[in-house]
Amino acid sequence: MYIGLDLGTSGLKGIVIDDAQTICAEATAPLRVNRPQAGWSEQAPQDWRAGAEAVFSSLATQTDLSAVRAIGLSGQMHGATLLDAQDKVLRPCILWNDTRAAAEAEEMDRNPIFRRRTGNIVFPGFTAPKLAWVRRWEPEIFAKVAKVLLPKDYLRLWLSSEHVAEMSDAAGTSWLDVGARAWSDDLLAATGLQCAQMPHLVEGSEVSGMLRRDLAARFGMRGDVVIAGGGGDNAASAIGVGVVRGGDAFVSLGTSGVLFAASDSYQPDPASAVHSFCHAVPKTWHQMGVILAASDALSWFGRVLGAAPADMTSGLGPLQAPSSTLFLPYLGGERTPHNDAVIRASFLNLDHSTDHIAMTRAVMEGVTYAVRDSFDALTSTGTKIERLLAVGGGSKSDYWVQAIATILGLPIELPVAGDFGGAFGAARLAMMATGAKVSDVAYAPKIARVIEPVPGLTDEFMAGLSAYRAAYQALKGLGGSAAG
């Protein structure tokens, strides 16, 4: 058997699969995000470890873990977990959706070496500008930093006592030479760091260490369980849905939104705000368009209404042309294609007839337009998307998926019911770490249904897209408080 752990923002999930990739057990532990100031987002790494202990304990009560051969890790990307020389956590982890380092990111991005080596804009959410912020505003902490780990790699340290990262997660730090798949001494020096403060790098399908014997004994596992490199959450999810070859892609409507396309070559275009990262398997890369608030935008509106998102979307009926009501889903800024940490969400064109249904549809349409923005950014680099799957909580809404299919002009495949997320992909990477081939493990799931575009609504959605883009241009100069 094989364990996959996925350290998300709102919870840590663990699954156990067997050789046939049947899920034998699963467990989750909730996590809380702390927001001590506007634009800040933090978690205590100690909470991740407590969550992992709870998940392992639950899995061990559901099934005999003595057959486990390997553990794979997936997790939220970009977080800055700072440790001293004794591996003590120096401060709360600054998370992926924290925008405090916008000024530092802008300053670093003006240095052409960053885009040239990493193939990406230096986004405020990436790890390197967070360290630049700590260096500027918390120098006493920066002086004690002995190791910088990404969130899932802090769990790896607990599991194996090893400081290790893998390529897909490391690509989101602004310290990795993404084409060479190696840390860049020049980029590290530009933020006052050295390679010795970075974890050792492996591929996601390689062995990164061994499970500590005391943990193996505690949870009923063998003494020779290996820990796979694993992957950043989106790369691991791609492994989970079999998106590992050029032309394959998926759209994820989770807390954030992602349009993810696998690539057999490295083809960066930083100016498009597309993320060009290493994939979690060797000699493969991927591109992503990232929307910071996808289903999170619907969840936010549900909290405003006091309603569950599923109830809000269940009675929408067949897909309709967008109304004049617009929603820009920039609750915490936006990445692709704007790289704008200041812009905030807005409703536009409200009138006396606007009701909660119209506003719900507007929220979903706003995210739909954002997906099209990412699609145009990816395809402008030469990336071809020939096959598209939908995953994530938002994909349970046929209305939403059909809106996206319509604006992209592509059919969207929905997998059969099952878990194809980061934990499942991490478990598949654990299988590879024991010798299984990528092609034998990371195959596409069975497809339950295909959602087709509605050609008769294409023009209306494209007109809505034009209005959406014009609204961003009109609002972006007003600043966060005025645009909110």
Image (cartoon, grey):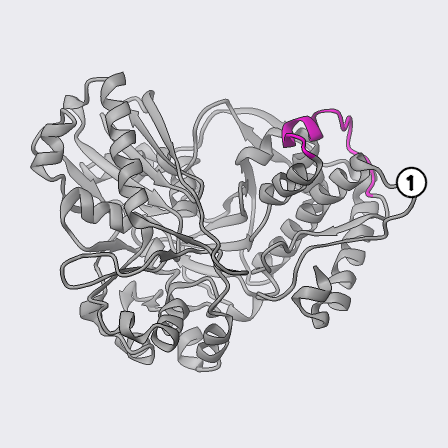
Looking at the rendering, which quadrant does residue 60 occupy? top left
Mark 1 residue type: Ser
Quadrant position of residue 312? top right
Magenta segment main secondary structure: loop
The residue depicted at 39 percent of the width and 74 percent of the height is 137
- Front residue (pair 119, 216): 216
Q: Which residue is mark 1?
A: 353
Q: Secondary structure at mark 1?
A: loop
The one nearer the camera, 217 or 384, is 217
Q: Position of residue 407 (x, y in %)?
A: 72, 45
Q: Taking 37 as reference, is 402 left or right?
A: right
Q: Quadrant of residue 237?
A: top left
338 or 95: nearer the viewer: 95
Q: Is residue 296 left or right of residue 468?
A: left
User: Residue 348, relative to residue 452: is it above or below?
Assistant: below
Q: Is residue 42 above or below residue 392?
A: below
Residue at horizontal 55 percent and vertical 33 percent from the top: 393
- Residue 192 rendering spot, x and y as whole percentages: 29, 78
Q: Is residue 248 left or right of residue 58?
A: right
Q: How many marks?
A: 1
Residue 175 horizontal/vertical position (percent): 33, 69
Magenta stretch in the rendered image: 306-322
Front-most of residues 374 and 149: 149
Q: Quadrant of the N terminus?
A: top left
Residue at image location 77% in from the left, 33% down from the top: 319
Label 1, residues with CA under 10 Å away: few <14, some 14-19, many ≥20: few
